[in-house]
């Protein structure tokens, strides 16, 4: 298990936390009165409703090559914000006890249209389809793909139950996001396509990426990308619908391929690893 503990320093995933809770001022002598000998128990903090207050930084999760997840929680410890600052994609699911649910964290994720449309297409390309058996028999509704730069939120709805999540490195999600983000950036650089056309084109390419990855396990990364984007391929034809002219499409495709030559090396899937807020 990867245990996470709070550290008193500025948070990469939170926005304002700069240390441990500020100490309260001691009561003045004049306000101190004898009691009846009983001490009122401290109130249990309410469970977090989201991860917007998860600004207490925790040690980063780094158990898997290519993965670094910055982590933060809130004062109740019932939230766990994970931001992928590594270079490969992960799939995040609830903890093994199912005490924590997984939700998106858009406030800590990329806001641009290229990134959002690319991730939407990746998520609907079949990686999380009902036919896909995720480790731990997790349903697709409780699994979120988290590429580099994106964040996810885990919430325990029970006060006193610390939040915990599990994650695995996923090769197909990494490949799809690299390809679709490169194509999306190039398409927007020419002229932003209509939203429905944009998504449909990227979704078609995402499905083609997943299929080629299954069929051509013999290809090295750059050979894989070159085959995926070759003239007449499903990705190339889908991309052609996003760019106004043939010449512009060819230039943009070449630039996307050049970018893919520099993306991180794809790595195989891993088992599930734990990430949990320490008590």
Image (cartoon, rainbow, N blue to C red):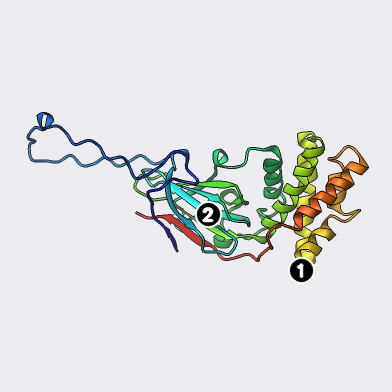
Instruction: Please state which of residues 7 and 120 is positioned toward the viewer in this rendering.
Output: 7
Q: Position of residue 161 (x, y in %)?
A: 37, 50
Visible residue check, residue 224:
yes
Dot 1 or dot 2: first in sequence order is: 2
Residue at 88%, 42% (x, y): give it.
248
Q: CA gap, disc 1 to disc 2?
A: 28 Å
Looking at the rendered structure, the number of numbered marks drawn on it comes to 2
Determine which residue is flagged by label 2. Answer: 69
Which mark is drawn over residue 217?
1
Q: What kind of element bears circle 2?
A: strand
Q: Position of residue 126 (x, y in %)?
A: 71, 53
Question: Considering only vertical position in the picture, is 225 above or below 123?
Answer: below
Q: Position of residue 75 (x, y in %)?
A: 36, 43
On screen, residue 135 versus residue 51, left or right, reads right
Question: Considering only vertical position in the picture, is 92 above or below 1?
Answer: above
Hey, which quadrant is residue 23 in on the image? top left
Q: Residue furthest top?
A: 30
Q: What kind of element bears circle 1?
A: loop
Visible residue check, residue 156:
no
Hey, which quadrant is residue 226 in on the image? bottom right
Foreground disc of the pair 1, 2 = 2
Q: Residue furthest bottom?
A: 218
């Amino acid at each position: 298990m990867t245990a996470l503990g709070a550290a008193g320093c500025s948070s990469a995933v939170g926005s304002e936390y700069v240390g441990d809770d500020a100490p309260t001022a001691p009561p003045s002598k004049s306000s101190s009165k004898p009691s009846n000998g009983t001490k009122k128990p401290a109130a249990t903090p309410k469970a977090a409703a989201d991860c917007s207050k998860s600004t207490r930084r925790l040690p980063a999760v780094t158990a898997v090559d290519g993965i670094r997840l910055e982590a933060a929680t809130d004062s109740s410890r019932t939230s766990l914000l994970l931001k992928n600052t590594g270079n490969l994609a992960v799939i995040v699911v609830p903890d093994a006890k199912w005490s924590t649910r997984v939700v998106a964290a858009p406030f800590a994720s990329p806001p641009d249209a290229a990134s959002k449309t690319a991730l939407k297409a990746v998520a609907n390309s079949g990686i999380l389809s009902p036919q896909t058996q995720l480790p731990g028999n997790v349903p697709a509704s409780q699994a979120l793909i988290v590429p580099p730069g994106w964040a996810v939120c885990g919430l325990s709805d029970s006060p006193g139950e610390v939040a915990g999540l599990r994650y695995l490195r996923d090769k197909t999600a990494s490949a799809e996001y690299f390809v679709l983000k490169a194509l999306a950036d190039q398409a927007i650089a020419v002229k932003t396509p209509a939203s429905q056309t944009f998504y449909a084109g990227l979704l078609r390419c995402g499905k083609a990426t997943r299929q080629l990855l299954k069929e051509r396990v013999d290809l090295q990364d750059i050979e894989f990308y070159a085959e995926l984007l070759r003239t007449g391929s499903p990705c190339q034809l889908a991309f052609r619908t996003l760019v106004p002219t043939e010449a512009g499409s060819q230039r943009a495709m070449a630039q996307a391929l050049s970018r893919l030559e520099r993306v991180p090396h794809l790595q195989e899937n891993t088992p599930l690893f734990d990430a949990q807020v320490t008590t």
